Amino acid sequence: MHSRNADKILLSIVLILLVFGLVMIASAGVIYSETRFEDKYYFFKHQLIYGVIPGLAALYFFSKINYSFWKKISVPFFFLSIIFLLLVFVPGIGSKVYGASRWIQLGPFSFQPSEMAKLSMVLYLAAWLESRGINRIKDVYEGLLPFVGILGLIGVLIMNQPDTGTFGIIVLTSLAIFFVAGANFRHIGLLGLMGLLILWVLIKLEPYRLNRIMTFLNPQADPQGTGYQINQALLAIGSGGILGVGLGHSRQKFNYLPEPVGDSIFAIIGEELGILGASVLIILFFMLALRGIKIAKNAPDFFGRLLAIGITMWIVFQAFINISANVALVPLTGVPMPFISYGGTSLVFLMSAVGILLNLSRHSRI
């Protein structure tokens, strides 16, 4: 094992995504910004000041820390994220937005602990599974049940916010790490069945989740109600055609499409830049996945491999779910597009994770 240069291709992809995101937020958010804040570039400026600049600083800082350091602090970092997840329910600290308790408000700064939970879960699982060893991971009592317990703890806190989309990403990422660590195939299948059962229970508890699934199955049933957002997203992508209507020329951003700088930004990309522009974005995420898998494959140790897979799959699953929701392949979940959607907390933690991945690439075995 020896130190080498960080993966320049991975860094280039992330920087391109970052610039692309800023351009699209400036374009997609111009009407929404003016309507809400009487400033056309409110979202652009906020993303730059509270997302991109601290995100780049985090990427640089984390890329300089030896990845093995995260093994030592994975447990306290995990429990710190749980404390933050609990604080969202404390009056005066947590704040409700659209009926969901997902934010901690400290003066002018707001922070979304569920984004921290994504990173802390990857670090904790990588360290915990490496310490177990392959035989214990395959065991029901030493591998499967503790894994379910860890997921359950995070799940209860995130689903009470409620934030189904974020928990879905954490579950998929955790399963990917568990699988690569050497989990029993039957245990993975059992977890899948358990997941379907939990989903059924969650739908029974909150009828709005059933509405989302019914809307997904038949978006035209209530185009002005539950199906409004997906219909407007499909209209945006459809009107973009192959080459798009041109950057800055979206019609759907004129307060037709909800959350044009958030989880619906892919629809605006499809409208303004067409299938061609949207395809370029998908290719960038595909290339990012390949670089991440290569870093995992050449990681110097088992912890590094699990860490690289966890970070890569988190980004890829989040991008896939966001894109799929915008083209009606999965129900709408409110999941932001990595590096592209508006949101400082999400971007800073994503950039921190990429910094860790870049450090790992410096310790590659080849």
Image (cartoon, rainbow, N blue to C red):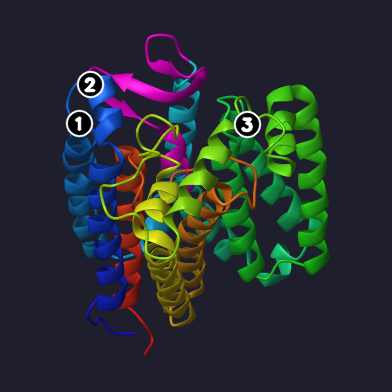
Question: Disc 2 or 1, which lies upstream in sequence?
Answer: 2
Furthest toward the top, the residue is 91
In this view of the protein, can residue 280 be seen by the observer? yes
Closer to viewer: mark 3 or mark 2 = 3
Q: Secondary structure at mark 1?
A: helix
Q: What's the amino acid at mark 3?
A: Pro
Considering depth in this image, is 277 or 294 the residue closer to the camera? 277
Residue occupying the point 23% across, 40% down: 47
Q: Position of residue 170 (x, y in %)?
A: 56, 48
Query: Which numbered tag is attached to residue 310?
Result: none
Between marks 3 and 1, how big is the CA–CA gap? Answer: 30 Å
Image quadrant in which you'd find residue 11: bottom left
Horizontal relation, residue 109 to residue 291: left or right: left
Question: Disc 3 or 1, which lies upstream in sequence?
Answer: 1
Q: Position of residue 25 (x, y in %)?
A: 28, 44
Q: Quadrant of the C terminus?
A: bottom left
Considering depth in this image, is 281 or 186 the residue closer to the camera? 281
Q: Position of residue 207 (x, y in %)?
A: 74, 23
Range covered by the magenta-colored residues: 90-119
Dot 2: within a 10 Å radius of its alpha carbon, few (fewer than 14), some, or many (20 or more) residues? few
Residue 270 located within the stretch drawn in magenta? no
Residue occupying the point 62% across, 24% down: 225
Dot 3: within a 10 Å radius of its alpha carbon, few (fewer than 14), some, or many (20 or more) residues? some
In this view of the protein, can residue 333 be seen by the observer? no
Closer to viewer: mark 3 or mark 1 = 3
Between marks 2 and 1, how big is the CA–CA gap? Answer: 7 Å
Q: Which residue is mark 2?
A: 37
Residue occupying the point 42% across, 34% down: 259
Q: Which residue is mark 1?
A: 42
